[in-house]
Each structure stands twice: as C-alpha cells, then as structure tokens.
Amino acid sequence: MALDAEVWKQVFQELIQEVKPWHRWTLTPDKGLLPDVLKPGWMQYQQWVFARFQCSSCSRSWASAQVQVLFHMHWSEEKSRGQVKMRVFAQRCKKCSQPPFEVPEFTLENISRILNNLVLRILKKCYRERFKSMEEIPMIKEVSLEGPHDRDNCEACLQGCCAEPTQAMSLPTSWIPRANATCPSGEHFSSYAPRSHTRRNIVGTCCCLLLLIVVVVVIIKTL
C-alpha cells in the first residue's frame, strides 16, 4: 500500500488504546486481501469512502466517494491480542490509454473517521459489546460529485467485489470514542460522541445564563 501506512497505524493505535489500553492490536496493509475470503476466526468490515486520486501518467486528478476500504479482523482472547489487515482499493485514469492503478489520497480527518468506524466495529464484533446506536461516522466530501461510479476504472469493480455503499447523512463534526458505560440494568454499552458538540452546548448554556442575569439586573434597576 503506497499510502502513508504509518499515519494509519498511528491513528489506529491512538483510537484503540483509548478504549482497550490493556490489549495489543496491530494494523497491517495487505494488497492481497479480498472480500468474503476469510481465514477461520476472522471477521470482515467494509467501508466506501471519499478520496482523491492523481494519475502518475498525465497528472490528471479526480475524486470519488466510492473508494472501498476493506478490513479483516481477528481477536485472540487468550493472548489479549488483535490483528487487523487492511486494503484500500485503487482506481485508474479514464483519459489515458494504459493507465496504472493509483492509490487514493485521504485527508487526516477522513482517516480518523474511517478508523473510528473500525474501532466501533471491533468493539461490537470482537468484544461483543452492545451499543445504543450503530451508525457509521460519515466521511467529509470536499467537493460535490456528479455522475455514476466509473466501474470500468475501479479496481474493486474489475475484481467483482465492489458494491453500492449505503448512503449516510453528512455531519461536519469530528467524532471520538467515549468511555464505556454500564446502564442500571447491568447491560454493557459503548458509544461514540462528537466532542465539538459537547463544547458548543456548554458555551451555549453559559451565554444563556449570562443573558438571563443581565435581564434580571436591568429589571431590578428600573423598579
């Protein structure tokens, strides 16, 4: 995988250590990974995300919201160790006659969102933790895209392993894992929450209280 694998590994470690600090997990790129071709004990997770491409032959650039990112996961409870194998499917330029497949370029924000979704899936599938909600964090689309998916130049489509992604609402906030919580019923839940929303709520509450105090002072002075 020509993309910066170290960035993916670092972000993944930060996220997984936040929720499972005593367990060891690794993230490894694997160009040979295929959907639904799993070793015993392994589980699969797929995402279709936004990324940019640039042709190494003609320097043409384009964007796609249907870039497939494939993960295979394995968890060993005895060793307290987990493994994740990852493959990002490429695309090629539709203008060149014999174009090579190009690796997509992701923003750091979208890398974080992709891996947040992965960690959420690990908690559900590998640790069997229950969730109040199971919605994926949507990707940020930098540009408005029109037209159908270019299946003739998609590596996943040409290998017969591409599918239409589920449409999701776009949220402009950054999401992070939140600490696990136990409900009064004894059921164990985990949740993801946007940190920026919490900050905005606090600021909004303080502004309202300050405005209320000013109004009360004005009323008292007029009496």
Image (cartoon, helix red, strand yellow):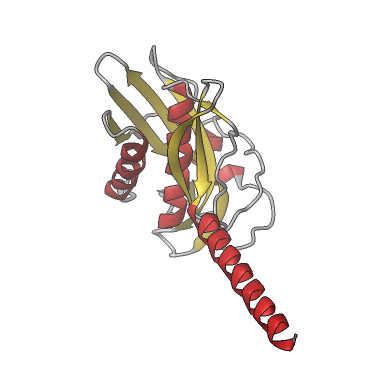
Residue at image location 68% in from the left, 57% down from the top: 146
Quadrant showing the C terminus: bottom right
Q: Quadrant of the N terminus?
A: top left
Vertical order, 223 against 199 (above or below): below
Percent x, y of residue 34: 44, 27
Residue 143 occupies quadrant: bottom right
The residue closer to the viewer here, 166 or 180, is 180
Query: Furthest residue to the right?
Result: 223
Give 109 or 131, whichever is nearer the viewer: 131
Front one among 16 and 33: 16
The residue shown at (37%, 36%) is 19
Q: Is residue 188 visible?
A: yes
Q: How many marks?
A: 0
Q: Residue lying farthest bottom? A: 222
| Front residue of 145 and 32 | 145
* Whole-percent x, y for residue 111 in the image: 42, 49
Compared with 109, 177 (above or below) is: above
208 to the left or right of 104: right
Q: In which quadrant of the rendered view does residue 217 lie?
A: bottom right
Q: Is residue 101 above or below residue 185?
A: below
Q: Residue at x 60, y 38 (%)?
A: 135
- Is residue 90 visible to us here? no
Q: Quadrant of residue 76?
A: top left
